[in-house]
Amino acid sequence: MEVFVESVGLLGPGLTGWPASRAVLTGSAAYVPGELLLPAPEALPAAERRRTGLPVKLALNVGLDALARSSRPSDTLASVFTSSGADGQVIHQICETLAGAERDVSPTRFHNSVHNAPAGYWSIALRSRAPSTSMCCFDWSFVAALLEACAYCTVEGEAVLLISYDLPYPEPLHSVRPIAGLLGAALLLGPRATSSCFAKLDVQIEADGRESTRMQDPALEALRCGNPTGRALPLLRALAGPTAATLVFEYLNGSAVKLTLSPC
């Protein structure tokens, strides 16, 4: 498959939006992890803003970070959302409720617990009726969603916004499924070269897996390994130039996904 990158969004510890993060990813500025503050997007109605948790805020803010540098109409843009676990805090709260004597689950908590909740809030915020897919594939969630987004571009011939986000679980779930920090990444992909694109991606699935491309900075490599969305970091580093690169991502059943990046 062949797709074209039109814009990027990135939010994480010490990564406060794509424009500020590019210098860190290219090594021209030091990576200094720090606290990330996530406001509820003003585009949401007041009632929905009050109901949003961190996963929704992260997903929507990183998607809007990508759209800030795009001229495409946001209400007609297809989307692919992915997370390895979505809202762990809500799941924790529901489990606490079910473990107690009173087992009445809050309707708000229930609708925030479903995997496509961020996609639903996104459609409300942008008043969008465009197609949207929500995916989960454990540590390979970003790669699976990238393949889905590329397939949509290729088959439908339309642009698509990929939004990947992952956050830590509270204890005791965190001890079973540890996730390092909170991280969101977004890619706006188009099916053909336009004046808006700045990089081309050739995407191939290889049956024989190879070791994934790593980050040179030890702290960023720890984030890549510790957070499923962090698997996107080598691609984002190449896009920050952009520089020509061949990247490998470990995938399911011993396979691999190879990306060949060329600046436009």
Image (tube, rainbow, N blue to C red):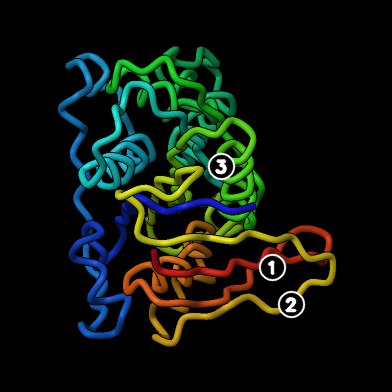
Q: Is residue 152 above or below residue 195?
A: above
Secondary structure under tag 2 reads loop
Residue depicted at 30% across the width and 16% down the height = 127
Which residue has dot 2 on it? 210
Please state which amino acid type lies under the numbered disc 3.
Ala
Residue depicted at 78% across the width and 65% down the height = 206
Cα separation between marks 1 and 2:
6 Å
Residue depicted at 46% across the width and 77% down the height = 244
Are discs 1 and 2 less than 8 Å apart at CB? yes
Question: Which one is closest to the eye, mark 3 or mark 1?
Answer: 3
Cα separation between marks 2 and 3:
22 Å
Q: Is residue 5 above or below residue 49?
A: below
- Counting residues from the start of the chain, the first of labels 1 and 2 encountered is 2
Mark drawn on residue 250? 1
Which residue has dot 3 on it? 149
Inspect this view and state whether residue 132 appears.
yes
